[in-house]
Amino acid sequence: MVQSNGDRIRIGPVISDVQPAEIAGELPELVTRGGAGARFAYEEFFYGRLRNPHTRKAYRFAVHEFLGRCEQLGIDLPEVSPRQISQYLDSLDCSPSTRKQRLAALRHFFDELVVRHVVVLNPAASVRGERYQVVEGKTPDIGVENARRLLASIRTDNAVGLRDRSIIGILIYTAARVGAVARLHRQDFYDTGDQHCLHFADKGGKSREIPVRHDLQGTLFTYLAAAKLGDADGGSPLFRSADGRTGHLTNRPVTAGDIARMVKRRLRDTGLSSRLSPHSFRVTTVTDLLTQGVPLEEVQYLAGHSDPRTTRLYDRRQRRVTRNIVERISI
């Protein structure tokens, strides 16, 4: 069933309430009409090629939206042309990066249809994306002094405070992503003989071992003792959720969302900007190391980036230079 709301097309029962995850089990009508080859290509693309659930969700949304529009226009899969792709992209009320993502989804999807002989040519292949260059990431950095202020503000007279200080310490001193911190188990904090390390299962299937600096190591040991996790089973979560405001921990692991809410609460209590997030620590750590002259390759390794250009997006030194320049304008 296709319903329209102006230029935005959705497939599903109620357009305003349906999200991509809710239509995961439904095939677009055009795919169903395309026969066994189209159905196989659809399943192969979304469940065989795309292993990242976030990418799968975003790409499915784009494909369903576009195919819904084609169905409304009475166009079957073999009849889709670059014109329909271009008009669809032009009609989107979103950022250039989102339009580039939608185009990428359609290109890959129609590639799969070409391979399975559903269509002869990929209509999205010749459609040019917008020129969009990101020189600096959008995540604000918390800054060294504010990060120190935040750490100092956390009370450590109970297990929850020690947990929060440990988590924020890991975000700062390892530049780890919040999802990787939430996935830590007791066995992921260990002694290698000459130092203690944390083992992260990071995005993209990357496995990383990061040494733990001495002050963070001490905080973690204090937390483990307070939470009675020193001799816990290796597969148990390293960080547990809090039992309300009792100052006690449950047996349930924290999630990335739990950590994000905790950081927001700690930032608010310290009087820091609400625009800051757990990712702000990662930005500040990268900028701080580059400011000290640490080689880009070493910072890239710590951040777990495959491409040094990604690491440069975290560098906020140029913004500080610009801020100094505008303050000198004598008008």
Image: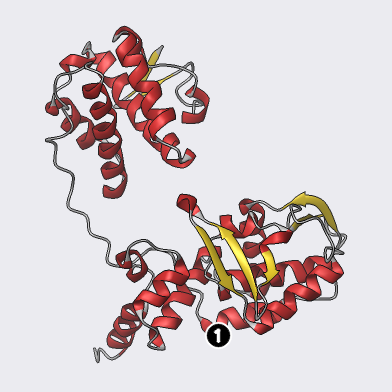
Q: How is the image coloured?
A: secondary structure
**In the structure shown, which secondary structural element does the residue marked by tag 1 occupy?**
helix
Quadrant assignment for the C terminus = bottom left
CA neighbours of label 1 inside 10 A, class few (<14), some (14 to 19), many (20+)? few
Q: Is residue 168 left or right of residue 289?
A: right
Query: Measuring 80% from the left and 75% from the top, which residue is drawn there?
Result: 222
When asked about the image quadrant of residue 2, the answer is top left
How many marks on residues? Answer: 1
Could you say where residue 302 lies in the image, as x and y percent from the top left?
Answer: 47, 71
Query: Measuring 44% from the left and 28% from the top, which residue is drawn there?
Result: 47
Could you say where residue 213 lies in the image, as x and y percent from the top left?
Answer: 62, 81
Q: Nearer the viewer, residue 211 or 31?
A: 211
Could you say where residue 317 lies in the image, as x and y percent from the top left?
Answer: 35, 81
- The residue that label 1 is drawn on is 145
Query: Measuring 30% from the left and 13% from the top, which residue is drawn there?
Result: 37
Picture layout, residue 298 above or below residue 304: below
Picture layout, residue 231 above or below residue 18: below
Q: Can the viewer see residue 277 in this picture?
A: no
Could you say where residue 149 lies in the image, as x and y percent from the top left?
Answer: 63, 82
> As shown in the figure, which amino acid type bears the numbered disc 1?
Glu
Quadrant assignment for the N terminus = top left
Q: Is residue 105 left or right of residue 251?
A: left
Query: Measuring 18% from the left and 15% from the top, which residue is drawn there?
Result: 78
When asked about the image quadrant of residue 4, the answer is top left
Q: Nearer the viewer, residue 254 or 303?
A: 303
